[in-house]
Amino acid sequence: MKEVQDFYFKKAKKEGYPARSVYKLEEAQQKYRLLKKGDKVLDLGCHPGSWSLYAAKVVGGQGLVVGIDLQKTSGGGKKDMAPIHWLHGDITDAEMLASVRGVAPAFDVVISDMAPSTSGNKWADQQQALALARRSLAVATEMLKRGGNYYCKVFQGEDVDAFFKEVRALFVSARLVKPKSSRSESREMFVLGMGFGG
Ligand SMILES: C[S@@+](CC[C@H](N)C(=O)[O-])C[C@H]1O[C@@H](n2cnc3c(N)ncnc32)[C@H](O)[C@@H]1O
């Protein structure tokens, strides 16, 4: 398994991404085409910036990316890439949505790779991760255009089924995705909702 992780780490470095997590989005994009040229993308938990940089390349110069994180993030600004607005803050703060709306009133895609800092208490960490996933879904519900797409990290656990059902009720299609670049021993998975019902 270590070789697989080293492979993605080296690949990310070579391709100019700050984290190998980029391939968890790239794999979904190659299979399901959730991002399209010209899209406006909202990236929750964007630091150190790989997903935003990748999305900015896919949507191209006519698109837009807004990345939010508790940590300050920078990068992008290259030719043929969408402009990236990096916002520094906590997405659970109500005022944060006003800052997002200040950049764009609505988005075609909301992606979330948010993860809490782990406490060592498995149950508490699972609850915290699920709370972030729920927050990202609430944000998606507020900010997505009709027909928009949603891609969000979750950790397998008893409450994930209920969360998945909520996504299924809001989108035309919903599926659970486990990218090859995500460690097989990790409980991390991604929920993909396509075609927001509005
Ligand atoms: C796995 S990292 C994201 C990696 C990123 N997708 C990339 O490819 O570079 C998870 C991020 O979620 C952020 N995060 C956790 N809780 C957050 C919150 N309430 N608001 C904003 N960001 C949060 C963390 O600060 C961390 O940087």
Image (cartoon, grey):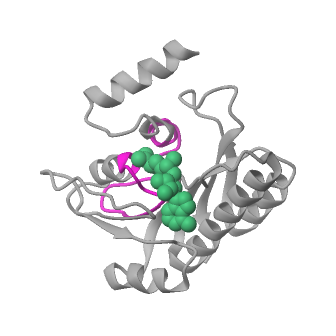
- Rendered view: 77 above or below 18: below
Give, as a single range, the part of the protein colored magenta: 25-51
Q: Residue 33, percent across and down?
A: 47, 46
In what quadrant of the picture does the C terminus appear? bottom right
Q: Residue furthest left?
A: 79
Tell me, yes or no, whether the highlighted magenta stretch contains residue 189: no
Vertical position of residue 92 compared to residue 151: above or below? below
Horizontal and vertical percent position of residue 180: 57, 27
Q: Which image quadrant is residue 165 in?
A: bottom right
Q: Is residue 35 magenta?
A: yes
Can residue 1 be seen in this snapshot?
A: yes
Q: Residue 107 in the image: x percent, y percent?
A: 43, 71
Using the rendered view, name the quadrant where residue 173 is placed: bottom right
Q: Is residue 183 left or right of residue 26?
A: right
Q: Residue placed farthest to the top in the image?
A: 3
Residue drawn at point x = 42 percent, y = 34 percent: 20
Whether residue 42 is situated above or below residue 48 in the rendered picture: below
Residue 6 is situated, as x and y percent measured from the top left of the image, at 44, 19
Q: Residue furthest right?
A: 158
* Residue positioned 40% across, 78% down in the render: 100
Which residue is rendered at x = 87% and y = 50% of the image? Answer: 158
